[in-house]
Amino acid sequence: MSDQKPRDAGEERPVQWREGNYTVTRSTAWSAPGCHDGCGVLFYTDDSGTLVKVEGDPENPYNQGALCMRCLNLPEAVNSPYRLKYPMKRDPSKRGQDAWERISWDEAMDTIEEKVHYYQENFGVESIVAFSGTGRETWWCTSWYVYTAFRTPNMSDGFLTGESCYNPRMSQMGLMIGDMCVADCAQFHELRYDEPTWEVPKCMLIWGNNPIASNADGFFGHWVVECMKRGTELVVVDPGMIWLAAKAKYWLPIRPGTDAALAMCFLNVAIEEDLLDHDFIDRWCWGFDEIAERVSEWTPEKAAEVCWLDADKIRAAARFYATSHPAAIQWGVAVDQSYSGVCAAQALTALWAVTGNMDVPGGNVIARGAYNTNLFGEAALHCVDPEVKKRRIGDNAYPFRGAGLVSDSALGDEIIKTLETGEPYPLKMAWLGGTNPIANMGAEAPRLRRGLLNTEFCVAVDYIMTPTIMAVADMVLPVSMNSERDSLRAWWYPMRAINKATTFYEAKSDEEIGIMLMNRLNPEQSPGKDIYEWYDFALKDGPGNYADFDWETLRKYTALWPKYEYRKYETGKIRFDGQPGFNTASGRFELYIPIMSQFDLDPLPWYDDPHEGPISTPELFEEYPFVLTTGARSYEFFHSEHRFLPTMREFHPWPTVEINYDVCKEMGLEEDDWVYVENHRGSCKLRVRPCKGLNRRVVRAEHGWWFPEQEGAEPHLFGTFDSNINNLIPQGDVGPSGYGAPIKCGICRIRKCSPSEVADSLTSKVITEGVF
């Protein structure tokens, strides 16, 4: 641990120093391997420049020296023999083969430039489609250079059906508030828990996520534990007995996919028992009477029947949240990942408003990037011709998304149809920026492989060889990892710098790749001649930005914290016109969203049961009698990453499915038995983990599995379809707005594998026969 003393607030800190035989570099962890956070770290490098140790930075208030095991294990990842060292290409006729040859960066850029110009001139800029993964700088950087250099409107997530990761929640918050809100665990204050204006939440409602394992979206999960130490009590909504559920005052093991019903019931209890902040409702809200009428039918008794819960426990939990002041809601992707995901988000957003927890200390507070810095790549969308933008894939099918009210991207559910049919126009070139959709992000995984093979030219940017790259790419560009780059981090507070500590062969950062592309293909609209001019632009000159410092200044501090204020809606600190209120059409907090009606969408929350399950398809449920939920986070992995690391695999060697302990006994299943998890779409093989804290009718399967230790060339493809739960998940069963999809509420059956089936390769069958 560093021997430096804690610094005073706002004090400049050394970026690099010697400590014994090591050079120590102060930085921020936001890079491959992926992460949603931005914790302060200390990189220890030896005299050869090799990263040998990572520790948490005790002087960084964000994480206060604490780190998850993914950061602690960075040296193993950075120095892994699986790393990609050089740009490589292969003949398109040899896709699926391990037939790569090393090329120079100049050759790679020359080829890309030639191909982009060819497709732009002969098929239109829209014939290029790009995908971005999660983590790293891909979340903002890839969009910047795709819109600027390629000028295509078709930038998308990696086939994430219904874009069911935060987008449904952001869409509703964006329309109801005009801003995003997060649970307040003092993370917006440099003094953290000693900040005098902050209050400890009396209740924290943990809904559909496991923050300690996931550390999701700018939220370091251990903050919940710190709040618990200071008196916070929990209500946990989760189908499984996670650690936080075991410590909770109330645990509601919900039937997966019924979140909207339970959220509306919480609202109903608060309204029926008059546990409301009438002053906030009367002065600042729009549509209270309408939403009150809508949720009136959702009594605890009705919700209990739908959600497989106890009515009295629902009522008690809802009452506890509504009477605790302040109270905060910390939610996760389970809210998004159902057909009615946007409605669950709308109801929960309304809940914290009407109970008096909107932008108050210890409640759900408005979150903007520090210094209002807009690093979202969508800020570069102006580089796309407006007439071309009208041809963006998915806009016609889902006009609400196409209006750009919240998100401005092409929809993966429609892109896969276009790849398959060539309608409304052919997609000739694909760009994969830090995404591994075949192994992780897209549903109907075998279908995605077939669709991407219909492109003529495919480039991937990554740090290891993945199943997706091996299957469909013609060129791969090696990307640098966290300790090997200079960069920015601003989601949400503070503004942070990533300081380079070492290099790895010819790997380059996402920003370096982006700058090369922009300066070659569209230099007039490039934000700078190098990455540092780009960062200065992002800090000071981007849309709405008002930082008064440059990147070089930021790196000297590593993190800078602007002062945070509460109840900003009262003082005109939210609206662009400086008036009190919210950034909405009415200027009020819109519990009823009028603009939804313009797209033939319901302005109020509603509930639709999962399209496959005990209520919607009872006969099919008899054949597949388990509700299948997937996507639960683990401490070792970030989605499909980290499977190549020996330490992580020692902790977590195999993909598992959790099944109720008594059900396992009845089925003759023991721990670590291989079973088929299967439904009418496909199957995969997982190992049994008996679980006492799980409903008899629910199973929880892990996602993101592939096996880097296996042969990469087809038909093996790192065993990517063998244990891929996305074989069973539908692509395109999305909500009426285009947001929300049943990733966490499918159906399945469990069948024990015979000895011969354990050795069978589902991947080989999919590739050679097209079937499971």
Image: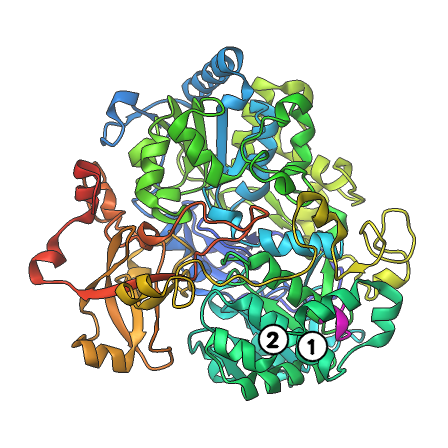
Residue at (80, 73) in percent of width and height: 197
**521 on left or right of 110:** right
Q: Which mark is residue 529?
A: none
Q: Which residues are magenta?
A: 352-359
Q: Residues within 10 Å of mark 2 (few under 14, many from 20)?
A: many
Identity of the residue drawn at 90% across and 47% down: 577
On the image, the x and y values in percent for residue 747 come to 34, 62
Residue 714 in view in this figure: yes
| Residue type, label 2 | Leu
Predominant SS along the magenta part: loop
The quarter of the displayed image where residue 718 is located: top left
Horizontal arrangement in the rendering, residue 698 relative to residue 587 (left or right):
left
Q: Is residue 126 above or below residue 35?
A: above
Sequence-earlier tag: 1 or 2: 2
In reply to whether residue 604 is colored magenta, the answer given is no
Q: Which residue is mark 1?
A: 327
Q: Secondary structure at mark 2?
A: strand
Residue 85, percent across and down?
Answer: 36, 35
- In the displayed structure, 173 sits above or below 327; it is above
Whether residue 61 is visible to the viewer of this picture, yes or no, is no
- Circle 1: residue type: Ala
Q: Residue at x 44, y 50 (%)?
A: 33
Residue at mark 2: 205
| Residue placed most toward the observer, 686 or 732 | 732
Side of 202 where 766 appears, left or right: left
Q: Is the C-beta separation of discs 1 and 2 under 8 Å?
A: yes
Q: Position of residue 41 (x, y in %)?
A: 54, 58
Q: Nearer the viewer, residue 308 or 526?
A: 308
Other residues around mark 1 within 10 Å, as few (<14) / some (14–19) / many (≥20): many
Looking at the picture, tell me which residue is in the foreground, 112 or 416: 416
Task: Kindly give the residue lying farthest to the front in the view shown.
Answer: 619
